[in-house]
Image (cartoon, rainbow, N blue to C red):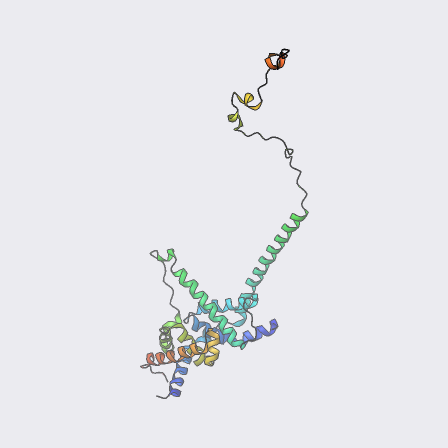
Amino acid sequence: MAPAELEQQIAALHPASFAWALACTRWNTAEAEEVLQSVYLSILEGRARFDGRSTFKTWLFAVVRNVAARARRRRWLEARAPWRLLPGAEAEPVDPLTAEEKGARVRRALGTLPARQREVLDLVFFHEMTVEQAAEVMEVSTGTARTHYHRGKLRLLELLGSEDLP
Amino acid sequence: MSSGDDEARLRAAMAEAHRRDAEHTPPFDATWRRSRPRRSTWRWAALTAGLAAAAAGIWLVTRPEPPPTSWPAIGTRWVGPTDFLLETPDLITLRSLPSLDPAADPWTARPAPRGTP
């Protein structure tokens, strides 16, 4: 794919990619921005290459998911670094998005689900993907994705049971 | 509640969760541009490393020959620093066969008497 065409496709998907990065980082905006920047960097450096085996969106979302997972692992290790255990170490700042309105309640409910259930629900119900496409993004078999989809759906409905959502 | 209702409800919940995403979405150009300088830095680092490796290779191939080292000639007897411990006072006796003075040898100096069988 020519660099200009690549840039054009990425630009068109930028808002959706950011929304997906937010879902992957549990709505931490700073982290989602960092993830997306790393994704673009990987693409520009040729470390992530689109080979045409799936749709461009599916491939890009898979890259976002992998980069977010790597960042999450790095943060997990950093949080357990010895200097973090010293008294006076600062707590992580609360993102303004997590402390507001009805959407925040849904995000909190989503946050209680296992990562794969949360991911498949986000991909299917917000990004309008099929379960098969979600499976490609999550790099799991369609059967596994379908299982996570059904379990996640039931669990989220149960959690939202008392919520006054439409 | 039907499956269709459930799905519509979940779709609405997801839309609610993502409702304010757009407000926080950074402009594409800024994110894309911020990725670029790091890319060129990486390339410069790789290019510099490559040039340094090439220069080292050229130097290794074209460097002047070092002066010949003066090695001892083959066959020179090497004397170990502790060889003197093997030198015993009777070493000369051990290294050579004892010889007798032929004049003092009664068997060679005196001819056999005539008539002896």
- Where in the figure is residue B82, as x and y percent of width and height? 52, 28
Decide if residue B21 is on the left or right side of residue B47: left
Q: In the rendered image, which quarter contains the C terminus of chain B?
A: top right
- Where in the figure is residue A164, as x and y percent of width and height? 34, 83
Q: In the rendered image, which quarter contains the N terminus of chain B?
A: bottom left
Placement of B113 over or under A104, stated as above or below: above
Give the image quarter of residue B39.
bottom right
Q: How many marks?
A: 0
Decide if residue A61 is on the left or right side of residue B106: left
Q: Residue at x 64, y 53 (%)?
A: B54
Q: Residue at x 41, y 61 (%)?
A: A77
* Towards the viewer: A146 or B80: B80
Q: Is residue B19 visible?
A: no
Q: Give the residue furthest to the left.
A: A162
Give the image quarter of residue B14.
bottom left
Placement of A45 over or under B10, stated as above or below: above
- Where in the figure is residue B33, as x and y percent of width and height? 55, 67
Q: Is residue B4 visible?
A: yes
- Where in the figure is residue B103, as x and y percent of width and height? 62, 12
